[in-house]
Amino acid sequence: MVETGCPCGSGKGYRECCGRFHAGAAAAPTAEALMRSRFSAYAKGDASYLLVTWAAATRPIRLDLDRKTRWTGLEILETTGGSPVHTEGTVRFRAHYTERGRPGVLEEHSTFAREDGRWVYVAAL
């Protein structure tokens, strides 16, 4: 099997980057790593990973991903906290996509926290 680049834009192969988090072989060590892995999950259509990495208090009951949206790139603009020693953090990012052949950009400032020792997405600021 040929290794493909990770959708998160890290420059690493998918399996060594976000793929190991998606497979459950490891947990994201930082809020930024979780943000990257969640972007890759959107790009790969992995709704179950997105739900598992969503804070229990803000997690939707289900998540229906729009198959017409193709996530094409991620830019991390800023991070605060979110390191292996923190319990909270934020990540500001731009996610690029195409929908029905038209390019778009989603810019968000997201909050993350540790829940049972693992980083989870809480909400957009």
Image (cartoon, helix red, strand yellow):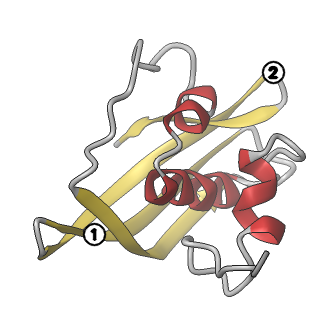
Q: Residue at x 27, y 69 (%)?
A: 97
Residue located beneath label 1 in the image: 97
Q: Quadrant of residue 115?
A: top right
Q: Earlier in the sequence, mark 1 or mark 2?
A: 1
Q: Horizontal placement of 100 versus 82: left or right?
A: left
**Residue nearest the observer in this picture, 96 or 121:** 96
Q: Residue at x 57, y 65 (%)?
A: 79
Q: Are marks 1 and 2 in contact (CB under 8 Å)?
A: no
Residue 36 location in percent, x, y?
Answer: 59, 62
Q: Quadrant of residue 52?
A: top right
Outermost front residue: 1
Amino acid residing under circle 2: Asp
Q: Secondary structure at mark 1?
A: strand
Residue located beneath label 2 in the image: 116
Question: Tag on residue 34?
Answer: none
How far apart marks 1 and 2 lie (CA) works out to 32 Å
Q: Secondary structure at mark 2?
A: loop
Considering only vertical position in the picture, is 51 above or below 96? above
Which quadrant is the C terminus positioned in? Answer: top left
Q: Quadrant of residue 99?
A: bottom left
Residue 84 location in percent, x, y?
Answer: 85, 52
Q: Residue at x 55, y 72 (%)?
A: 7
